[in-house]
Amino acid sequence: MSKFIINGGNPIHGEIDVQGAKNAVLPILAATILADGESVIHNCPKLRDVDKTDLVLEELGCTVRREGGTVYINPNGLCGCRICEELMRQMRSSIIFLGAIVSRCGEAVVSMPGGCPIGLRPIDLHLKALRELGVEISEKHGYIHCTSNGIRGANIHLDFPSVGATENIMLAAVISDGVTTVSNAAREPEIVDLQNFLNSMGAEIAGAGGNIIRIKGVDKLHGSEYAIMPDRIVAATYLAAAAITGGEILLNKAEPRDMGAILQVLREMGPDVKIGGDKIYLKSKGLLRSVHTVRTMPYPGFPTDIQSPFMALASLARGTSVFVENIFENRFQHVDELVRMGADIKVEGRSAVVRGVEGLQGANVVSRELRGGAALVVAALAAEGQTVISGIEYIDRGYENIENYLGSCGADIKRA
């Protein structure tokens, strides 16, 4: 397996164009099977999870073709309603296909999803919502069997604003009889991106970005051409890389409006942060300051996906920071690896207390999940000496050629 070899100590200086958002592109690719005709998706990042999604589409009978950052999907050959267990185990977000397949085919068979081991992502909210839409569901031998004689509109209240459940409802209900209302819906920007794509296909959906989404069922959808929104988590990771190394960076093709909580914490830690249009500029002003408490919350709160890289940042800040993880119960797997590099972090339950140290040292460390791996990259850029990171297949799930982007800004990072 590949590894990253990083020689720390080089400040990050330069410009980066932010890639398309992983958490937006996957449900949008799933949505393409609902169309009559080809869809063209631009700004599609080259990621392991996108590659797996393409394989799912092909397994279902779609024709998939990539040219650079553009993917062409034609679902007219759709002939399957089953996703094999191997693909489901490799990607947690594969469950997002459930609503789209049962809506298009009247039947869907999937196994329980896999992916990063960051904790439970119960799909009971997905299944409960689909049942309210008239889908009959049985669970046998690790497989979920769904059948439907036609989706019926319903009023659905989510007990938790789950992103995946909200997306599955949208995908299932867009072609239906009647109106579906989702209350306590997830408000993430990626939900808005999915709404915009579905509406470009002929859907009638309103309210995404708020806690109530209204879906008026239509008879059919057509193919569409669409560009994926920028990845706010990738953007925040590169900002953290510049801040921890005492550098300066300009992000182009970003969306600062989606990053309010992230940018607020960055400013509290000391760097100069400026925004304008689709650009974010950060310049380090010297020693980082600790933040009192960072609590991960559903959007518009601080995202769980950037907790790990910001913990790496806090490990070199002056003072003590506290991180409280409210979304996933097993998202501190990076802590032991950061401690191996010299960080002072103590975990108790869902809280991590980070006392800033004078410096970090290079070490051999292991990435055990996507965002924790990004945290190790951020820490290694500022560490003294060489860091070798294994398990980088997790990082490749969400970061497109991270070594090339950082290398273009002065980092000494190589894939070996």
Image (tube, helix red, strand yellow):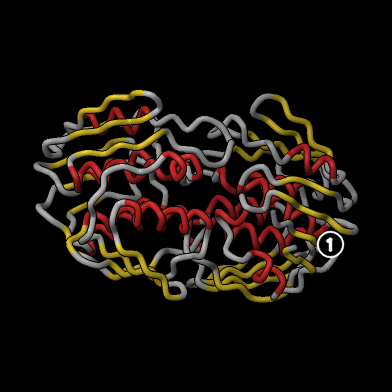
* Left or right placement of residue 145 versus residue 344 in this view: left
Amino acid at circle 1: Gly
| Crowd tier of the residue under label 1, counting other residues whose Cα lies within 10 Å: few below 14, some 14–19, many 20 or above | many
Residue situated in front as seen by the camera: 182 or 377 = 377
Residue at point 58%, 68% (across, down): 280
The answer to whether any part of residue 212 appears in the image is no
| Residue 213, x across and y down, in percent | 26, 44
Residue lying at 60% horizontally and 53% vertically, measured from the top left? 264
Q: Give the structural element (helix, strand or loop) at label 1.
A: loop
Left or right of 156 on screen, residue 266: right
Q: Quadrant of residue 137?
A: top left
Give the residue at x 40% y 37%: 162
Relative to 277, say whether 80 is above or below: above
Pointer 1: what residue?
8
* Position above or below: 50 against 127: below
At a point 23% along the width and 55% down the height, the residue shown is 78
